[in-house]
Image: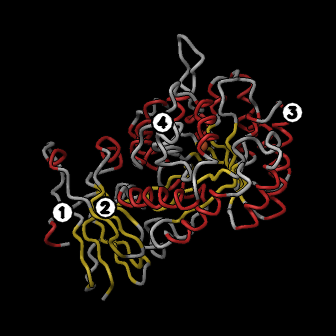
Amino acid sequence: MVDLLIKNATLPDGQTGVDIACDGGKIIAVEAGIAAGAGQVIDAGGQLVSPPFVDPHFHMDATLSLGRPRMNTSGTLLEGIALWGELKPLQTVDEIIERALHYCDIAVSMGIGAIRSHVDVCDDELKGVTALLEVREQIKDYIDLQLVAFPQDGVFRDPTAMDNTLRALDMGVDVVGGIPHFERTMAEGARSVTALCEIAAARGLMVDMHCDESDDPLSRHVETLAYETTRLGLQGRVAGSHLTSMHSMDNYYVSKLIPLMAEAELCVIPNPSINIMLQGRHDTYPKRRGQTRVRELRDAGLCVGFGQDCMMDPWYSLGRADMLDVALMGLHVGQLSSRADMTWCFDAVTQNSARIMGLQDYGLVKGCDANFVILQAKDPIEAIRLRATRLHVIRKGKVIAQTPASVAALDLPNRPKAIDPSQV
Ligand code: FE2
């Protein structure tokens, strides 16, 4: 007798007719024809069962603040940063908590099981840090929330940012952040990478920097990030978020850079929806796409995970906590259209991002946490195509969200039979 038995699942790797037995919050068996009795049985009807979606780059302290105190009229990154600076002194800890918890409800319903959120520490009261530490505790049964100390205004450019970064880490923030391209000079940017990586090394923490979120091909802080990662022995624990300048870099230089990044085992987090919206704004035509070199980085062996970055905040008015939207955008912008590439885009919002966050017991094998999503799709490509309905979201063996099947999707030919709600 087990707590939960999922019957007739299709797995992301293509296995079909698989049963998943869960007990005590863990997966205890993944195989065909499990005969055990169960407290709850869900017939997946051949639909795709995936580990939860993982968002490795988000700003939960800003989400759902759209229109506060005004709209971003130019739609640019720099006006977004200025607008965020206007909102920060106005908002309260309670307001940030309320918005974040609202967002987490949406995220759970969309099958997100883990989020890495940057939290702005350029606020001497550390309101965002206080709020999101509380949120991390409140939602721990539903979402693994990892926080990054993010000096939005530059750890050297803002006179109290370094002190605030250290205070935030002392308070329990998990990861060291940075924004070297926003420091006053290239030299200061490089110095910030060194200083922040040294802090991470001394404290045994991971690093995730907003790095080279610029169209300037000479914004090369990722080179310093790779160098410091190797020098300090931080391989596998450091992520470069955005890396959009790589899109515009000289190809010869990149042929040297990517092997250095691979040597450092850097993780890479493009944010497709936001980068395609915000980059290339100074271009006439042709306009650059503003996404880093996803295919080349992946093929060089780097772990690449797509992030959402923003939803209804000073930088981006849209978004709906849908990591399949993110995968779809990354797929298009990166021209990742072969069957293997499209399937890989699904990995980029699930297992790759879980690896970047260092999640333990993530996956659909025996011994992992019983966390997964049953999607109304027959495989990862169809899940992306349809931005498939999350029929059941399961956490530690319990159903925590359900959405009725989409009738429109069911009208398509050759679809697997929908689950029978009466058997849930
Ligand atoms: Fe960001």
Could you say where residue 322 lies in the image, as x and y percent from the top left?
A: 39, 48
Could you say where residue 113 lies in the image, as x and y percent from the top left?
A: 46, 62
Secondary element type, mark 4: helix
Q: CA distance from mark 1 to mark 2?
A: 10 Å
Question: Depth-wise, is mark 4 or mark 1 nearer the camera?
Answer: 4
Give the quarter the ligand 1 occupies. Answer: top right
Secondary element type, mark 3: helix
Q: Which residue is mark 3?
A: 187
- Some atom of ligand 1 lies within 8 Å of the CB belonging to the residue at label 4: no
As displayed, is residue 255 above or below residue 158?
above
Callout 1 amino acid: Ile
Q: CA distance from mark 4 to mark 1?
A: 32 Å
Q: Residue at x 30, y 67 (%)?
A: 18
Mark with earlier residue (3, 1)? 3
Callout 4 amino acid: Ser
Q: CA distance from mark 2 to mark 3?
A: 49 Å
Mark with earlier residue (2, 3)? 3
Front residue of 245 and 19: 245
Question: Depth-wise, is mark 3 or mark 1 nearer the camera?
Answer: 3
Mark with earlier residue (4, 1)? 4
Front residue of 73 and 190: 73
Q: Is residue 105 left or right of residue 408?
A: right
**Labelled pair 1, 2 in contact (Cβ < 8 Å):** yes
Q: Residue at x 72, y 47 (%)?
A: 151
Secondary element type, mark 2: strand
Q: Which residue is mark 1?
A: 419
Could you say where residue 245 lies in the image, as x and y percent from the top left?
A: 66, 28
**Dot 3 alpha-carbon crowd within 10 angstroms: few under 14, some 14 to 19, many 20 or more:** few
Give the quarter of the figure containing the C terminus: bottom left
Q: Which residue is mark 2?
A: 374
